[in-house]
Image (cartoon, rainbow, N blue to C red):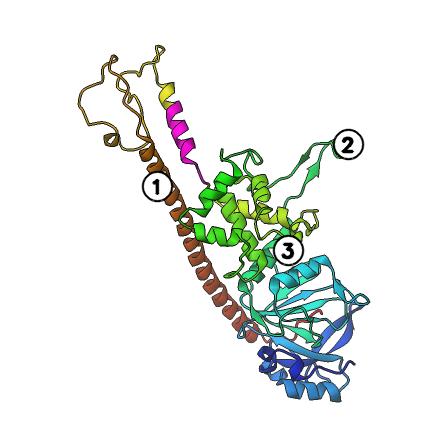
């Protein structure tokens, strides 16, 4: 057994809790499994029975005095801790994580240590774990009725403290666990050199993805985004500022969602513009998923899927109104009776006095609204849309808060059921 860590080598957030056990390896179904042991004894502990746990000092003394393999910390519904277990992602000789693990560790940005085998990592955060599946491949997350083996072999590049990371955990769950069910690219034809037709099924991609859905130059579109009602927030993200977000990945998603709105959900254009921003980094082009998708591709895809509204330039509205007017014109090119000769999309009283008389065919068409009026209407439209974005974001935050409260209530009920069921000890993997 490796000498167990001292209290000084571990975050106070776990040392100060009386949720400690010892552990040893035991074969089960032909495979080695780590099982919890009551400190100072050879009896099994239970991850749902607090009477089998103890304080850190007692557990450490027990680990030194009895034939066990190390210390373990139990997660409960009463503490705010979440454990993220990354397996088979570290080369013990090189002492370096794989690109996949390095990205998750960077996203979570909290206390991280090397697992007992030296081939994985354990990350500890505080926050809430979303409902649904909590395991896929070499990744597992849990917050109750399980235990972590604790080594104190701290990864130097990570904080020495356990940080609050609810949003980062949600990002990991969304990107890593949801990715298991994402539709992937399929290739038709037999051309092995890449000229065969390739299609990707995504529920969110617009039918004309890749087209210029917003007929403005990139520079003009960015200028409008920066001078909109929420332009200050957009500008901060565009310049590469991540303050206010739990991780760089959260800031990436926030900027991509804004770009998805301004580009009308044009995935290719979102990607093109993001590469010009201060948030762009080498990670953007790193292959991150089993289907071969890069981090950037998946981020754009999910940003577009999560954005229900899209920017419509006033120019497009004016053009549509002009087309509609032209469609109702007579063959001679004059307005048909009982139809307005010209419309700016605003109230009729703003362009001509009200009248009960039907205009004569010989009367000249009404003068179009002056440029300043059209510009004002455009600004009003932009303000209206940006206000709607802010309202949607606020509504989303409110719903997430309610969902979190409901999850917490469910967790409490589950914990009560576990305690009343008298369950023994679910095993925990490394």
- Residue 274 is inside the magenta segment: no
If you read the primary sequence from the N terminus, does the residue marked by circle 1 or circle 3 appear first? 3
Q: Say what secondary structure mark 2 lies in.
A: loop
Crowdedness near tag 2: few (<14), some (14–19) or many (≥20) residues, C-alpha within 10 Å: few
Q: Residue at x 40, y 35 (%)?
A: 314
User: Is 232 left or right of 366, judged from the image as shown?
Assistant: right
Front-lying residue, 143 or 409: 143
Q: Secondary structure at mark 3?
A: helix
Residue 137: quarter of image? bottom right
Q: Which residue is mark 1?
A: 380
| Image quarter of the N terminus | bottom right
The secondary structure type at the circle numbered 1 is: helix
| One can see residue 415 in this view | yes
The residue that disc 3 covers is 176
> Considering the image in quadrants, where does the C terminus appear?
bottom right
Relative horizontal placement of residue 414, taking residue 153 as reference (left or right): left
* Above or below for 114 versus 220: below
Evaluate if marks 2 and 1 touch, with contact meaning CB atoms under 8 Å apart.
no
First in sequence, mark 2 or 3: give its number.
3
Query: Would residue 346 appear left or right of 299 to someone viewing this image?
Result: left
Q: Which residue position holds label 2?
A: 190
């Amino acid at each position: 057994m490796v000498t167990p860590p001292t209290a000084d080598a571990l975050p106070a957030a776990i040392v100060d809790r009386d949720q400690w056990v010892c552990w040893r390896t035991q074969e089960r179904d032909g495979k080695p499994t780590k099982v919890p042991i009551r400190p100072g004894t050879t009896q099994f502990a239970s991850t749902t029975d607090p009477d089998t746990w103890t304080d850190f000092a007692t557990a450490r003394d027990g680990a030194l005095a009895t034939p066990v393999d190390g210390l373990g910390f139990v997660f409960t519904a009463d503490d705010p801790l979440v454990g993220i277990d990354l397996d088979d992602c570290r080369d013990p000789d090189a002492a370096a994580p794989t690109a996949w693990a390095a990205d998750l560790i960077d996203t979570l940005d909290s206390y991280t240590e090397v697992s007992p085998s030296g081939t994985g990592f354990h990350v500890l955060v505080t926050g809430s774990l979303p409902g649904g599946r909590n395991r896929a491949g070499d990744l597992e997350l849990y917050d109750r009725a399980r235990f972590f083996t604790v080594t104190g072999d701290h990864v130097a590049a990570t904080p020495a403290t356990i940080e609050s990371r609810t949003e980062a955990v949600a990002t990991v769950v969304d990107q890593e666990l949801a990715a298991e069910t994402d539709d992937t690219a399929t290739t038709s034809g037999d051309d092995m050199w890449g000229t065969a037709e390739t299609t990707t099924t995504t529920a969110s991609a617009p039918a004309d993805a890749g087209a210029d859905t917003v007929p403005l130059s990139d520079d003009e579109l960015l200028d409008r985004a920066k001078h909109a009602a929420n332009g200050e927030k957009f500008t901060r993200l565009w310049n590469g500022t991540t303050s206010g977000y739990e991780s760089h990945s959260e800031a990436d998603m926030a900027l991509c969602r804004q770009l998805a709105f301004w580009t009308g959900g044009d995935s290719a254009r979102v990607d093109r513009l993001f590469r010009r921003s201060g948030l762009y980094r080498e990670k953007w082009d790193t292959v991150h998923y089993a289907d071969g998708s890069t981090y950037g591709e998946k981020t754009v895809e999910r940003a577009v899927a999560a954005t229900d509204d899209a920017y419509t330039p006033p120019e497009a509205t004016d053009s549509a109104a002009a087309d509609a007017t032209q469609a109702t014109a007579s063959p001679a090119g004059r307005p048909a009776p009982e139809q307005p000769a010209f419309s700016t999309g605003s109230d009729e009283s703003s362009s001509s006095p009200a009248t009960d008389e039907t205009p004569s065919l010989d009367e000249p068409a009404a003068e179009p609204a002056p440029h300043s009026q059209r510009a004002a209407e455009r600004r009003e439209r932009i303000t209206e849309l940006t206000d709607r974005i802010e309202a949607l974001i606020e509504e989303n935050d409110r719903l997430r808060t309610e969902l979190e409260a409901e999850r917490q209530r469910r967790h409490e009920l589950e914990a009560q059921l576990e305690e009343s069921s008298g369950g023994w000890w679910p095993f925990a993997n490394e």
